[in-house]
C-alpha cells in the first residue's frame, strides 16, 4: 500500500476562471440631478443651466461618473445631454444610471475583453464564491462567451462543481 497522496484536482486539467479578476474596482462618483432641481422636483431650464455653469466640474477629473436622479421627477433628455457637455471633457467616463448599474456595465465591458479562444476545448470552472458582488448577470455573460469554445463549463470550485454545459460530441 502506498502513502503517496495524489492531487486529483491538479491533475484534472480544469481551468478555474474567477470573475472577480474582471470586476471593476475604480471609484464611481454620482452626479444627482435632484440637487439641481427646483424644490428637488422640478427642472426649470434657466436655473438648471445656471446651476450647471456654477458647478465645480474639476471634482470629476479622471473619474467615472454615474448621472442619475434620485427624485421622482420627469427629466427631459436634453438635460442629460447638457450635463454631458460639462462632464465629457473632464471625466474618465459617464453613464446615465446609478452607481450599481454603471459598475455592472463596466463589468460586462471587462468580460467582453476576455479572449475566448484561450478556453478552446478546455474544461472551465467558473469560480462561485468570493468577496465581491458578482451578480447572476455576470455568470450568464461568461457562459455566453465560453459556450461556443469550451469543452465543458462548470460552476463552483474544482473539488466540487455543478455541471453547466458539455459540448456535444
Image (spheres, helix red, strand yellow):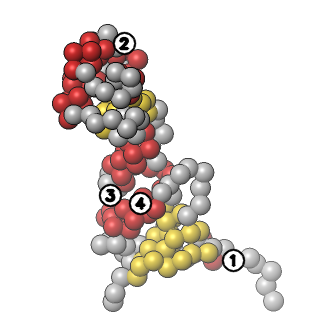
Instruction: Note whether residue 95 is visible.
Output: no
- Camera-nearest residue between 54 and 23: 54
Quick check: marks 2 and 1 in contact, CB under 8 Å?
no
Q: Residues within 10 Å of mark 2 (few under 14, many from 20)?
A: few
Report the residue at 27% width, 19% height from top. 48
Tell me the SS state at disc 1: loop
Residue behind mark 3 = 115
In the figure, residue 33 lies in which quadrant? top left
Tell me the SS state at disc 4: helix
Alpha carbon separation for disc pair 4 and 3: 19 Å
- Look at discs 4 and 1 and give the one toward the viewer: 4
User: How far from the left and from the top, in percent, is residue 127?
Assistant: 54, 63
Residue behind mark 1 = 6
Alpha carbon separation for disc pair 3 and 2: 40 Å
- Look at discs 2 and 1 and give the one toward the viewer: 2
- Look at discs 2 and 4 and give the one toward the viewer: 2
First reached walking from the N terminus: tag 3 or tag 2:
2
Tell me the SS state at disc 3: loop
- Look at discs 3 and 2 and give the one toward the viewer: 2
Amino acid at each position: 500500500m502506498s502513502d503517496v497522496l495524489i492531487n486529483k484536482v491538479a491533475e484534472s486539467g480544469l481551468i478555474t476562471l474567477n470573475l472577480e479578476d474582471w470586476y471593476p474596482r475604480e471609484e464611481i462618483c454620482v452626479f444627482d440631478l435632484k440637487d439641481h432641481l427646483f424644490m428637488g422636483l422640478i427642472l426649470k431650464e434657466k436655473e438648471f443651466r445656471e446651476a450647471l455653469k456654477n458647478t465645480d466640474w474639476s471634482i470629476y477629473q479622471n473619474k467615472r461618473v454615474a448621472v442619475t436622479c434620485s427624485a421622482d421627477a420627469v427629466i427631459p433628455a436634453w438635460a442629460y445631454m447638457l450635463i454631458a457637455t460639462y462632464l465629457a471633457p473632464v471625466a474618465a467616463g459617464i453613464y446615465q444610471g446609478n452607481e450599481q448599474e454603471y459598475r455592472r456595465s463596466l463589468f460586462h465591458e471587462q468580460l467582453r475583453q476576455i479572449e475566448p479562444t484561450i478556453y478552446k476545448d478546455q474544461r472551465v470552472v467558473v469560480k462561485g464564491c468570493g468577496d465581491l458582488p458578482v451578480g447572476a448577470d455576470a455568470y450568464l455573460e461568461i457562459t455566453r462567451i465560453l459556450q461556443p469554445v469550451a469543452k465543458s463549463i462548470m460552476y463552483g470550485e474544482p473539488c466540487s462543481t455543478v455541471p453547466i454545459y458539455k459540448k456535444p460530441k
